[in-house]
Amino acid sequence: MPNQWLITPDKYLSTTEIKQLIKTIKDATLIAKSKGIIAPVRDSAIIQFTLGSGLRVKELSNLKVEHLHFQRGSNQIVVYNGKGNKDRIVTISSTLKNIIQEYIEYNNSDSPYLFPSERGEQLTRSGIQQIFKKWAKKAGLPKRYSIHSLRHTYATNLYKASGFNLRLVQKQLGHSSISTTQVYADTFDEDLENAVENIDLG
């Protein structure tokens, strides 16, 4: 039986697939804004937010506007009751912060939730999953991907961007044990990649 904790390349999006997904949903967002429609704008914010924060689907569902801490130049969000009922602070990029602020201004919702349903209620986990599946299909991505694939994508990208800093990835993902985060180190080994390139095949 395959090891589910082995993060193989088919469990996260490639750079090309990320671009496909973002372009598809951004194009739809432009049309939606021209018609005053909310849903695609919210969906775009959900997908970009997940790609840029690595939150679990339950954490996305529970996230409220008041959990964003963007004052005084801060780019942080507080995740309450994450896995194991633990709270953590997640730092996001300035670019993602701007995307979320623009979305909030456009959405202009009375709902306390950052990503509410059309009725202003809390989106369910299955609802968020369906949103991802809808746009992944439109972007022509493989059916195997789920909203959790975006968390894996974020983790692998952060691991590389941080210069292979496993502790930093552990903190952002909210893993209680570094051994859980280790799966991403097993995916990318810079020394190994450099070493195999130097093998002389004659």
Image (cartoon, rainbow, N blue to C red):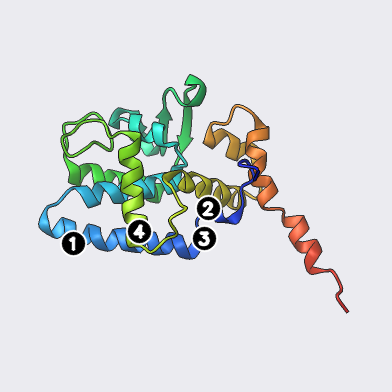
SS at mark 3?
A: loop
Q: Residues within 10 Å of mark 2 (few under 14, many from 20)?
A: many
User: Residue beneath label 2, please?
Assistant: 12
Q: Nearer the viewer, mark 3 or mark 4?
A: 4
**What distance separates the C-alpha of mark 2 from that of mark 4?**
16 Å
- Name the residue tied to disc 4: 137
Q: Which mark is residue 31?
A: 1
Q: CA distance from mark 2 to mark 3?
A: 7 Å
Looking at the image, can residue 108 be seen?
yes
Dot 4 falls on a residue whose secondary structure is helix
Gap between marks 3 and 4 measured at Cα = 16 Å
In the image, residue 85 above or below residue 10: above
Q: Where does the image place residue 124, in percent across and percent down from the top left?
A: 31, 33
Q: Is residue 193 above or below residue 113?
A: below
* Mark 2 in CB contact with mark 3 (< 8 angstroms): yes
Cα distance, mark 2 to mark 1? 28 Å
The kind of residue tagged 3 is Ser
**Residue at which label 3 appears:** 14
**CA–CA distance in space, label 3 to label 1:** 26 Å
14 vs 94, nearest the viewer: 14
Nearer to me, 45 or 71 = 45
**What amino acid is at disc 1?**
Ile
For marks 2 and 4, give the one nearer the viewer: 4
